[in-house]
């Protein structure tokens, strides 16, 4: 690259701009200074003229007012004497005195003495006498080729104008003085601009020298040499730019090492990510697969390189053209088999170059098996709630329609229909209350009022209450060890646990059956088991009885007015006390519900 000449350099541009700004500033200041100087000097001159006119008019008014004898000088003679006494050496001045009719009574101009006695036609003089007001004006006199200031002052006697005095003074001396001062200012300005121009050259060099060095350094760097550094001359913007330039040099020098380090970091991140990442080219051939993606798909990542993404993810039935892959955004892919459910979510995005051309695809896959399971449970829950509410509402609607059609007049049928309607209403109320309680437990809003409770005596009190209202066909047996054991618990909530389990045991026990309540105290906990002699629960359904709305025998549950939420609430309450609950059963041989509560003194004996 060619060297830049002086006349094309930024240094010359700085100098020219600096001088132009300085000239502009001098012109603005000079214009303002000249205007103010002219105004001040002319105002001062006019004020001095006004003082002389006022003094002269006072003397003339005295002359006009004096009464004269025959041997005293006449008015014209006295006026001429007063005019001759006026000092006009410093200022070129012309003085005329007029009577009331405008006749000239005297003048200081020797060559104008012949005009004395003549009437003046000057309009300013006539207006001054007529309006009894002074007149001032400044104009250029073409006869004398000069600027003059004219002051006409009325002469007042006995409250009215008796004449006027006209005072004409030349302003040329004032303007000569202004011109002299301006010449001095101009000479000073030229000298200041010259000195400033020299200083501007020196200042411009201090700015352009580092820039010139940066240009040379940039040319060196463009050839691949990053070893040289710039000199930093100060802490101003140029100095900071030089430091930044040196920093850029260092960054470029180590760029390859940094890029290599980032590549290794990215490889490490991809290897340890929990989500799978698959990169492909624009044709869909796999170019990169991390370990997480390989584990999800069940293959070796090296074996997948070059394979088609559609085949790798089993998308043949969903996507045929790889170019349509990003249009799908994301999709659920089911890899489940008969034994193990496994569902993944694949999110697709494109890789584009600077020209917006697709150069490849990035696929991120995540294991969403648990999420899908929870979503299915949510859908099942909504379906169950809808079904459980629809059944009693349908029953109530049928009975109410029958009553409205005339069954209410039948004294045998009407009470039975109303009783059924009331039972269904009560069941819906219980269901809604149970749902509200579950909702509070899900959001941790259910209040717990825990206290230190002697558990053996508490269980005896609960069972005594049941024995007072025990069905005649059911026997309640208890096996509670002696001694005292203390539990940190909410008595009302634990009572609800016993109520739900024992009530179910009564419902499903046959006539003549027994319900056994046993307590076993271990080192850190108490185990409570409640056993009935009912029909039992199939083994494959034992882990589902604590799910919401699950019933092993739906028909029998509805017969007893159950909501399908009792055991779900029981499980939540036991876990809220840091306990566990489970079931043991064999078909035809009854069911045993067991739950534990931590004793006080254990790590979890005083939970939340």
Image (cartoon, rainbow, N blue to C red):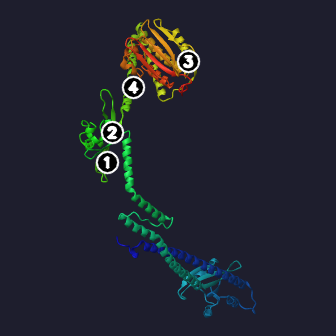
Element carrying mark 3: helix
Element carrying mark 4: helix
Q: Nearer the viewer, mark 4 or mark 2?
A: 2
Q: Nearer the viewer, mark 4 or mark 1?
A: 1
Instruction: Tell me where residue 398 appears, x and y as whole percent.
Output: 37, 16
Ranked by sequence position, the earlier of labels 4 and 1 is 1
CB contact under 8 Å: marks 1 and 3: no
Question: Which residue occupies the foreground of this view, 17 or 49?
Answer: 17
Q: Pointer 1: what residue?
A: 351
Q: Quadrant of the C terminus?
A: top right
Question: Can I make out residue 404 in this image?
Answer: no
- Give the vertical position of 428 relative to 360 (above or below): above
Looking at the rendering, which quadrant does residue 420 occupy?
top left
Q: Pointer 2: what residue?
A: 293
Ranked by sequence position, the earlier of labels 1 and 3 is 1
Ranked by sequence position, the earlier of labels 4 and 2 is 2
Q: Pointer 4: what residue?
A: 381
State the separation of the CA atoms marked 4 and 2: 33 Å
CB contact under 8 Å: marks 3 and 2: no
CB contact under 8 Å: marks 1 and 2: no
- Give the vertical position of 492 relative to 372 (above or below): above
Instruction: Tell me where residue 521 appears, x and y as whole percent.
Output: 52, 18
Element carrying mark 2: helix
Instruction: Tell me where residue 464 appears, x and y as whole percent.
Output: 54, 11
Q: Quadrant of the N terminus?
A: bottom left
Quick check: 225 left or right of 452? left
Question: Which residue occupies the foreground of this view, 86 or 548?
Answer: 548
Q: Which mark is residue 455?
A: 3
Quick check: 304 left or right of 26? left
Question: How many dots with numbers?
Answer: 4
């Amino acid at each position: 690259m060619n060297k830049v000449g002086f006349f094309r350099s930024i240094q010359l541009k700085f100098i020219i701009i600096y001088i132009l700004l300085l000239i502009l500033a001098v012109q603005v200041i000079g214009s303002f200074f000249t205007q103010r100087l002219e105004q001040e000097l002319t105002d001062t001159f006019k004020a001095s003229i006004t003082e002389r006119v006022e003094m002269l008019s006072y003397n003339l008014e005295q002359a006009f007012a004096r009464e004269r004898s025959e041997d005293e000088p006449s008015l014209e003679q006295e006026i001429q004497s007063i005019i001759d006494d006026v000092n006009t050496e410093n200022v070129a001045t012309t003085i005329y005195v007029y009577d009331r009719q405008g006749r000239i009574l005297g003048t200081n101009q020797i060559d104008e003495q012949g005009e004395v006695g003549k009437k003046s036609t000057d309009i300013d003089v006539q207006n001054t006498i007529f309006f009894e007001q002074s007149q001032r004006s400044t104009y250029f006199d073409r006869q004398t080729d000069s600027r003059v200031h004219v002051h006409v002052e009325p002469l007042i006697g006995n409250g009215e104008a008796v004449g006027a005095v006209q005072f004409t003074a030349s302003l040329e001396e004032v303007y000569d003085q202004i011109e002299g001062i301006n010449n001095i200012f101009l000479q000073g300005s030229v000298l200041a601009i010259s000195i400033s121009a020299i200083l501007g050259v020196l200042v411009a060099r201090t700015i352009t020298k580092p820039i010139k060095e940066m240009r040379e350094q940039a040319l060196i760097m463009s050839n691949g040499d990053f070893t040289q550094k710039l000199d930093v001359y100060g802490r101003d913007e140029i100095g900071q730019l030089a430091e930044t330039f040196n920093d850029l040099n260092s960054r470029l020098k180590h760029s390859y090492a940094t890029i290599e380090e980032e590549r290794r970091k990215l490889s490490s991140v991809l290897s340890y990510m929990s989500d799978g990442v698959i990169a492909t080219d624009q044709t869909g051939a796999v170019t990169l697969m991390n370990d997480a993606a390989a584990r999800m798909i069940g293959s070796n990542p090296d074996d997948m390189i070059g394979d088609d993404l559609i085949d790798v993810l089993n998308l043949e039935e969903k996507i045929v053209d790889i170019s349509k892959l990003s249009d799908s955004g994301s999709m659920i892919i089911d890899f489940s088999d008969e034994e193990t459910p496994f569902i993944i979510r694949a999110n697709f995005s494109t890789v584009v170059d600077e020209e917006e051309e697709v150069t490849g695809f990035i696929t991120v896959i995540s294991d969403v098996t648990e999420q899908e399971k929870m979503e299915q449970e949510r859908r099942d829950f909504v379906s169950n709630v809808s079904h459980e509410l629809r059944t009693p509402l349908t029953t109530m609607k049928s009975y109410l329609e029958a009553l409205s059609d005339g069954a209410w007049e039948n004294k045998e049928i009407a009470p039975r229909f109303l009783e059924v309607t009331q039972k269904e209403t009560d069941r819906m109320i219980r269901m809604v209350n149970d749902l509200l309680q579950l909702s509070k437990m899900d959001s941790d809003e259910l209040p717990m009022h825990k206290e230190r409770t002697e558990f053996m005596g508490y269980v005896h009190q609960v069972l005594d209450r049941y024995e007072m209202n025990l069905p005649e066909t059911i026997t309640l047996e208890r096996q509670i060890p002696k001694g005292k054991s203390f539990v940190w618990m909410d008595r009302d909530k634990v009572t609800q646990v016993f109520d739900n389990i024992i009530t179910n045991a009564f419902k499903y026990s046959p006539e003549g059956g027994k319900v056994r309540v046993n307590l076993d105290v271990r080192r850190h906990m108490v185990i409570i088991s409640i056993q009935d002699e009912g029909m039992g629960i199939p083994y494959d359904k034992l882990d589902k009885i604590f799910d919401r709305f699950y019933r092993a025998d739906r028909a029998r549950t509805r017969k007893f007015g159950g909501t399908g939420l009792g055991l779900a609430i029981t499980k939540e309450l036991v876990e809220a006390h840091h306990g566990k609950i489970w079931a043991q059963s064999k078909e035809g041989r009854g069911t045993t519900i067991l739950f534990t509560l931590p004793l006080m003194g254990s790590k979890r004996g005083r939970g939340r």
